[in-house]
Image: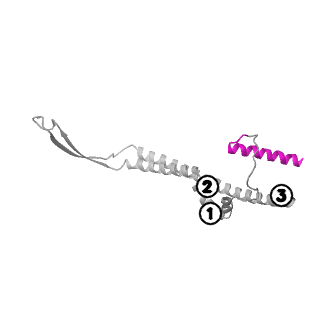
């Protein structure tokens, strides 16, 4: 019975591997690397302390970067909402060569250059609390993203710990299998 279960488990693992690599499910897969030979990158990673693995893990995940960018974007949106309460100054300058130039009287069919300079100052004194409400909404959303990042970090820590335990149990199973053979 155990032999049949082991063969079925091996067939299922082979079918799952075929699915993951994009091969036909019924196609036999022949490994070229011995099962007891560790992959160099995993061996070097397994040798690192747990704290260092946890520190490096978020940098390798695209989801973490996306959450961090979204949080920064919401914080910038909140800052921009409050910026609308400050005065704004707009300066402009223009040079206009024209033939005929309509700023010169009497009009003549000659090229004449005119220029203008302007300064516009505006300050919204009362907006009904709209800017503060927009800033509070963006800040609340950024805090929610921050909580998602904390949850993501906790999940990554758990996954790293689980994978290290899987690696240890796999090594122990290989050693036990070698002794049994």
Could you say which disc has been placed on residue 52 in the image?
A: 1
In three-dimensional space, the C-alpha distance between marks 2 and 1, rounded to whole angstroms, equals: 13 Å
Q: Position of residue 124 (x, y in %)?
A: 33, 45
Range of magenta residues = 1-24
In three-dimensional space, the C-alpha distance between marks 1 and 3, rounded to whole angstroms, equals: 32 Å
Q: Position of residue 108 (x, y in %)?
A: 11, 35
Q: Is residue 55 left or right of residue 33?
A: left
Q: Quadrant of the C terminus?
A: bottom right
What residue did someone put label 3 on?
A: 177
Within 10 Å of disc 1 (Cα), the crowding (few <14, some 14-19, many 20+) is few
Q: Is residue 36 left or right of residue 48?
A: right
Q: Position of residue 67 (x, y in %)?
A: 55, 50
Which residue is located at x 84 percent, y 48 percent?
6
Describe the element under mark 2 as helix, strand or loop. Answer: helix
Which residue is located at x 66 percent, y 65 percent?
49
Could you say which disc has been placed on residue 153 in the image?
A: 2
User: In the orientation shown, which residue stands out farthest toward the left?
Assistant: 106
């Amino acid at each position: 019975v155990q032999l049949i279960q082991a063969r079925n488990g091996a067939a299922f693992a082979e079918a799952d591997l075929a699915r993951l690599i994009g091969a036909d499910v019924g196609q036999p897969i022949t490994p070229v690397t011995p099962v007891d030979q560790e992959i160099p990158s995993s061996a070097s990673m397994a040798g690192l302390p747990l704290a260092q693995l946890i520190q490096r893990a978020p940098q390798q995940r695209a989801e973490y970067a996306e959450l961090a960018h979204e949080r920064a974007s919401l914080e910038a949106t909140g800052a921009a909402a409050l910026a609308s309460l400050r005065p704004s100054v707009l300066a402009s300058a223009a040079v206009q060569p024209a033939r005929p130039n309509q700023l010169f009287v009497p009009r003549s069919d000659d090229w004449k250059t005119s220029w203008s300079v302007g300064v516009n100052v505006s300050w919204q004194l009362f907006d009904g609390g709209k800017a503060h409400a927009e800033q509070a909404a963006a800040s609340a959303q950024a805090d929610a993203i921050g909580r998602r990042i904390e949850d993501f970090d906790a999940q990554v820590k758990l996954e790293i710990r689980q994978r290290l335990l899987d690696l240890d149990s796999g090594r122990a199973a290989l050693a036990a299998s070698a002794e049994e053979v």
